[in-house]
Image: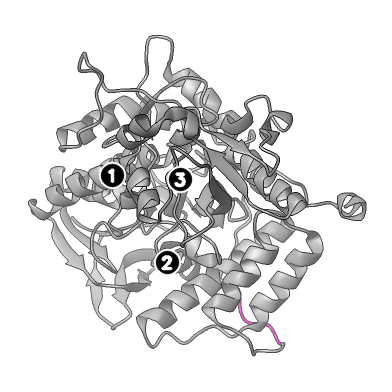
Amino acid sequence: MNVIVVGGGIAGLTTALRADALGYDVTLVAKGALGDGCTAHAQGGIAGVYGPDDSPALHALDTLQAGDGHGDALAISALVDGAHAAIDALIASGVRFDRTPDGEVARALEAAHSRARIAHAGGDATGAAISAALTHRVRTSSITDREGLFVADLIVAAGRVAGIRSIDGETLRAHAVVLATGGAGGLYAHTTNPRGTTADGIAIALRAGAAVADLEFMQFHPTVLVDGGPFLVSEAVRGAGAVLRDAAGRRFLIDEHPDAELAPRDIVARAIARRAEEQGEAIVLDATALGSAALAERFPTIDAELRRRGIDWSRQPVAVTPAAHYLMGGVVSDVDGRTTLPGLWAVGETARTGVHGANRLASNSLLEGAVFGARAAEALAPSAPPFRWPASAPRHMHTSEPDRAGAAGGFSRRALQELMWEHVGLIRTEEGLRDAVARLHAWPMPVAASAADQEDANLLTVARSMASAALARTGSLGAHFILSRALIGAA
């Protein structure tokens, strides 16, 4: 059986390796080099290392609560119950997680977790360690590696996915296609994601007619450096004791949530944005109490980057701001990665499993890629059960929407990113969303004559569906925050 996996992050690499081990003929396709995506940039760890006072059930509860009650119980159970095996598989693949003096995998605490259950590698280089180990395994396996092949669309025959078509016109046939292309940070003017994160897999699925859901839920990471270009400062820094302060030096988050700096990300990000606007200057992250030696040992990647920028964060707080980080929605998939389109699977950030609900719990993303990547590979057999619609997924389908009549001028990637940041960003209004929907549909769809054009077309395709989904959800939920008319009038 021939299988094509599109994407070279933890979800795609895991799927490809497991499918290869099961005896499938696997081709792994990536538009750039393997490891170019978000996985290698992940400073946070992977959740699921349970101590004596912890359990999968507690992890599941934290996940559901962080997701504002919008998560899918079946998917969350699959995630936490699969954590032990997934982490063991990463260790067997060569990932060297940080250890305690007695040899156990060290457990750290991050925001909205009730227990310390996060494993890290190289302090703040977990994603890089995982990416390197899995990429090495792929390159020494029987998997056919097609780097530099940009998939434009799926081949659909008789209602079933039968392969892929690249932007250069090359076609590859397969019995199954797995989309694992990552998220959609490229929709926004300010993002933690690498440049190539342009919602490719979701756009591909939309054009083929697969269902997508929860696109309105984009997570904004609270602590990204203000100066010198975007660089994420891991949530684990706050988990280790760093605090957020306003211009008066006050820990303002104490008034926002009982967990203060360790509240769910949507709450922390909005509080930072509001306070920064009120005071007219940036919020700062104060890690000085941790000390120079501890910061360098625990967070070597962040420490080196800050010092490269001339910042000694052991002596001075650093200015931070929210930025687009992680998409909770995507292509609707069941707990085995199957989508509404036969022959098509989706895993990782491309998929809407329902695990993250309306707001992702820290360090669940790497775990999701590892757990559901392996589950998808196991479900590729023709005899596997058909797609099962997740109980938490809405039954209406966002579709690839046609252009509307209107002014066509003004489109560029930068214009789209600024529009999304302003109107479909951290804090939204009904009026702003209506304006965004109208302008996005007035812009003509780019003709994909180059890789950049194809990325623009993918971004516009997903932006239209995302803005429409945000407008359709009239109440605030998790990362989707609508500023009501009453609050606007009081501001």
Give the distance between the C-alpha atoms of the residues marked 3 and 1, in whole angstroms: 45 Å
Crowd class of label 1 (few under 14; some 14 to 19; many from 20; radius 10 Å): few
Q: Earlier in the sequence, mark 3 or mark 1?
A: 3
Residue 195 sits in quarter: bottom left
Q: Could you say whether the residue bearing mark 2 is in a helix, strand or loop?
A: helix
Q: Amino acid at mark 1?
A: Ser
Q: Amino acid at mark 3?
A: Val
Q: Which mark is residue 200?
A: 2
Q: Position of residue 473 (x, y in %)?
A: 72, 53
Residue 210 visible here: no
Q: Which mark is residue 383?
A: 1
- Majority secondary structure in the magenta region: loop
Q: Is residue 302 magenta?
A: no
Magenta part of the protein: which range?
A: 401-405
Q: Is residue 384 above or below residue 414?
A: above
Give the distance between the C-alpha atoms of the residues marked 1 and 2, in whole angstroms: 29 Å
